């Protein structure tokens, strides 16, 4: 049940055709797991908090560094040296006191991933490395939790939504390929766009509106200001979601 | 057999900022090899010592993922290839 204050706060989105109070209540009840409080995690959590997602659980083991501040807009100079999740949670709680923000400082590993995401309604992939993205993808598939992928490099970004059992997963997309984790070039406006796309997908999924970005990889090329879609086929032999997997 | 290959702007440094390049070839391999013939600096970035596309890249024909990455897969006149690299930043 929405309070009078919530009805006023979310009035403009409740007005959207197909959204309504029912949609807002769905957001309020939702528990979102956000893996990463960096370049992507910042816009994702800001816009999910703005939309009124009831519980936002943020996982990140890093501390704020000066070189983060060109893009990780949840963290400010006053937060340098502090934990990213604490910095993020403090801002989000001030921004929207009506939602619950939980923090996790553990590194996401094969041993704990299942437990960390256990009671979540969805997982947002805002990580900075492929091995952890695969861990989250596999856990999402295993538990039947929708997974919202995003990644950036320079002025380019990608996004794809995974609905377990129905659409291609991250491993169908990249087939286990990895690239070394290394310092990558990026400017803040790129994760801003991709993070907003991920947050949009989350809201659409929860409310039940529109068409999700499933079986499609959206490629954002900011230098040419162009979006391109690539068709991604579900791999029947995928080690994460295929019928022959040992999951 | 004329095919268009579109590459990411990050490769512009190797192609004088040409990102949509017309190549000749009947297979993916022939097209990629014509691409690196035109822009030799791309060769070490895109291909391994056997002339195959490196693991960090995927290839799409007319917007559809080619998997397994079969370099002998035929292409036809007017096809468009996209070479995209795996990105992981967040």
Image (spheres, coloured by chain):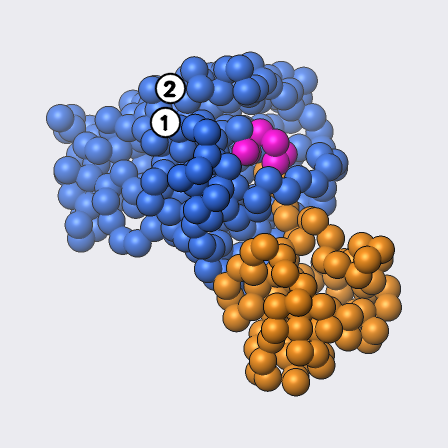
Seen from the viewer's position, the closer of residues B69 and A228 is B69
* Crowd tier of the residue under label 1, counting other residues whose Cα lies within 10 Å: few below 14, some 14–19, many 20 or above: some
Where's residue A83, x and y in %?
59, 17
Q: Is A247 on the left-hand or right-hand side of A108?
A: left
Residue shown at 49% from the left, 20% from the top: A113
First to last magenta residue range: A128-134
Circle 1 chain: A
Label 1–label 2 contact, CB within 8 A: yes
Q: Earlier in the sequence, mark 1 or mark 2?
A: 2
Residue in front for this viewpoint, B88 or B37: B37
- Residue A130 magenta: yes
**Residue assigned mark 2:** A118
| Secondary structure type for disc 1 | helix
Residue A193 image position (x, y, % from top left): 50, 49
Q: Is residue A194 above or below residue B58?
A: above
* Chain identifier of the blue chain: A
**Badge 2 local density, few (<14 within 10 Å), some, or many (20+)?**
some
**Camera-side mark, 1 or 2:** 1
State the image quarter where residue A7 is shown: top left
Q: Residue furthest front?
A: A244
Chain letter, orange in picture = B
Q: Are marks 1 and 2 on the same chain?
A: yes
Compared across the picture, whether A20 is left or right of A77 comes to left
Viewer-side residue, A132 vs B12 = A132
Label number found at residue A143: 1
Which residue shows up at 73% across the image and 73% down it?
B30
């Amino acid at each position: 049940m929405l309070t009078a204050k919530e009805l006023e706060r979310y009035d403009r989105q409740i007005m959207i055709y197909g959204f309504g109070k029912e949609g807002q209540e769905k957001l309020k009840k939702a528990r979102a797991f956000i893996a990463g409080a960096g370049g992507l995690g910042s816009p994702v959590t800001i816009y999910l908090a703005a939309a009124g997602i009831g519980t936002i659980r943020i996982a990140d083991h890093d501390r704020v560094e000066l070189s983060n501040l060109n893009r990780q807009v949840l963290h400010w100079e006053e937060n340098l040296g502090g934990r990213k999740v604490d910095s993020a949670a403090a801002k989000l709680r001030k921004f929207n006191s009506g939602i619950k923000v939980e923090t996790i400082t553990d590194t996401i590993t094969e041993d704990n991933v299942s437990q960390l995401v256990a009671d979540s309604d969805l997982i947002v992939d805002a990580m900075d490395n492929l091995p952890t993205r695969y861990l989250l993808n596999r856990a999402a598939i295993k538990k039947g939790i929708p997974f919202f992928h995003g990644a950036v490099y320079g002025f380019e970004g990608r996004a794809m939504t995974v609905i377990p059992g129905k659409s291609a997963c991250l491993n169908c997309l990249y087939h286990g390929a990895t690239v070394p984790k290394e310092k990558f070039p990026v400017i803040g406006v790129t994760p801003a766009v991709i993070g907003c796309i991920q947050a949009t997908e989350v809201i659409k999924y929860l409310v039940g509106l529109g068409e999700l970005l499933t079986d499609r990889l959206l490629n954002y090329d900011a230098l040419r200001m162009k979006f391109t879609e690539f068709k991604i086929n579900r791999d029947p032999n995928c080690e994460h979601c295929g019928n022959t997997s040992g999951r | 057999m004329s095919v268009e290959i579109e590459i990411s702007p990050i490769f512009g440094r190797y192609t004088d900022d040409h990102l949509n390049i017309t190549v000749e070839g009947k297979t993916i391999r022939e097209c990629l090899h014509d691409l690196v013939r035109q822009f030799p600096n791309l060769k070490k970035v895109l291909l391994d010592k056997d002339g195959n596309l490196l693991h960090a890249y995927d290839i799409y024909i007319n917007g559809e993922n080619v998997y397994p990455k079969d370099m002998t897969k035929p292409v036809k006149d007017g096809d468009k290839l996209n070479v995209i690299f795996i990105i992981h930043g967040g």
